[in-house]
Amino acid sequence: MNLHLDAYKTALAQFNRAARYLDFSDDLLEYMRYPRREFTVNFPVRRDDGSMEMFTGYRVHHNTALGPSKGGIRYSTAVTLDEVRALAMWMTWKSALVNIPYGGAKGGVVVDPRTLSLGELERLTRRYASELIPLISPHSDIPAPDMGTNAQVMAWFMDTYSMTVGYSVPAIVTGKPKTIGGSEGRTEATGRGVVVTMTSCLHHHGETAPDRIDVAIQGFGNVGSNAAIYAHECGYRVVAVSDIDGGIYNPGGLDIPAVVAFAKERGSVIDFPRAENITNEELLAIPCDVLIPAAMEGQLHGDNAHKVKARYVVEGANGPTTPEGDDILNDRGIIVVPDILANAGGVIVSYFEWVQDMQAFFWDKSAVLERLEGILTAAYEQVQHNAEEHNIDLRTAAQVTAIKRVGEAIMTRGFYP
Ligand SMILES: NC(=O)C1=CN([C@@H]2O[C@H](COP(=O)(O)OP(=O)(O)OC[C@H]3O[C@@H](n4cnc5c(N)ncnc54)[C@H](OP(=O)(O)O)[C@@H]3O)[C@@H](O)[C@H]2O)C=CC1
Ligand SMILES: O=C(O)CCC(=O)C(=O)O
């Protein structure tokens, strides 16, 4: 299975499912299936040993009817144009769903960042940023971190853009360090938002005692580790977590602050004391109440969705469930809280960061977190209401809501011929 070619197929299949519930013309629907712009760059980077290596990067704008395009930048050897297309399309729906004035974009470079020294990572980032200059600005396209990138990468990005235009432009990226215009709460926003939407969903089903809920999380990067930390703080029992090398399981609950410290020191959660080592495939099938896939696309599919024991799947990653996986989970009565809702906390706080940068007026952390929770809780309730009204699953309900907003904006602006 080619997960990355499949990511775009997954995005289109989800769109086609939602389209059945929309009263839009075939022409308008066809327009929304396509990315607006696709940009490919090939650029050289000097390695520490003096040699030169060529790298390929992408930036795709899916739709900009609601505002400037917004979306993260991924560094991974698995990056392809098709994957970036899918991720950009999901960004369009995500921002529309939570009512923030953005279109959708995504970028990526084909590289394993773990194979680069800090200096090489900086040179690669600065060169990629400068190659994107024709496409980005605080008014047209605003990058942010995604898999394999972080606040430091965003700082180099912001500095490269600022040096090019000749003055500081903090609003060119979000997810920056706070010392240069980053927002309170952005680092933990996505993981925290996953737990907020999980809680909304559990409460909707009358499950209000966190200590009776066992949670398993695939991926222990920005999203997975922050989801684990906040779930633990809220009193949920996190029984399993994993990274690329595999996972750990303790049915009595993991001491998450200790796992975070262990992973920081050792570079992996594997071999954490007081837990059993498991594989990523075993983690997806672990006995638990909530499964949070927070690593990458295509993890729950036609060959393993029947093994899931969780009663809820809350998607921290983008596109972790294929349409075949969705069908199996839906048939089995497993509730899936979709990515464009569950992981929208990141782009919501990115929006707050951009607003703060544009106004040069900064908010305290409690204001950020309160507004984040307010938006996510309202979005969950709206999606749940639409799902019940039309007797459809939460993913289709979320996509219908989002696509409707984008389609209406396209029609209202009148640039649809
Ligand atoms: N960062 C953000 O704000 C947002 C991210 N997302 C999505 O969340 C997901 C994770 O992103 P993020 O946390 O930022 O990325 P990170 O790079 O910070 O972390 C990714 C995590 O997934 C693990 N991983 C990578 N590949 C695999 C694999 N094949 N199987 C199991 N685990 C794997 C990594 O392991 P290791 O540490 O060993 O490399 C790491 O623990 C992505 O789908 C991203 O698009 C969605 C919304 C916002
Ligand atoms: O914070 C952002 O602007 C985008 C985050 C992102 O890439 C995502 O939600 O998938």
Image (tube, rainbow, N blue to C red):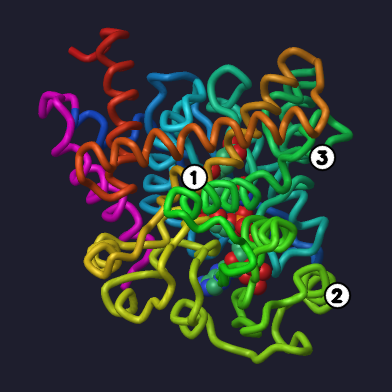
Q: Main secondary structure of the magenta part?
A: helix
Residue wearing tag 2 = 265
Secondary element type, mark 1: strand
Q: Residue 223: percent from the left, percent from the top?
A: 63, 56
Using the rendered view, name the quadrant where residue 355 is placed.
top right
| Left or right: residue 313 compared with residue 147 | left
Point out the tag, 1 or 3, that comes first from the N-terminus: 1
Amino acid on which the number 2 mark rests in the picture: Glu
Q: Which residues are magenta?
A: 1-28
Secondary element type, mark 3: loop
Q: Nearer the viewer, residue 206 or 225?
A: 206
Point out the tag, 2 or 1, that comes first from the N-terminus: 1
Amino acid on which the number 3 mark rests in the picture: Pro
Residue wearing tag 3 = 177
- Cα gap from disc 1 to disc 3, whole angstroms: 24 Å
Question: Who's the residue at 56% across and 61% down the image?
Answer: 76
Question: Who's the residue at 53% across and 32% down the image?
Answer: 70
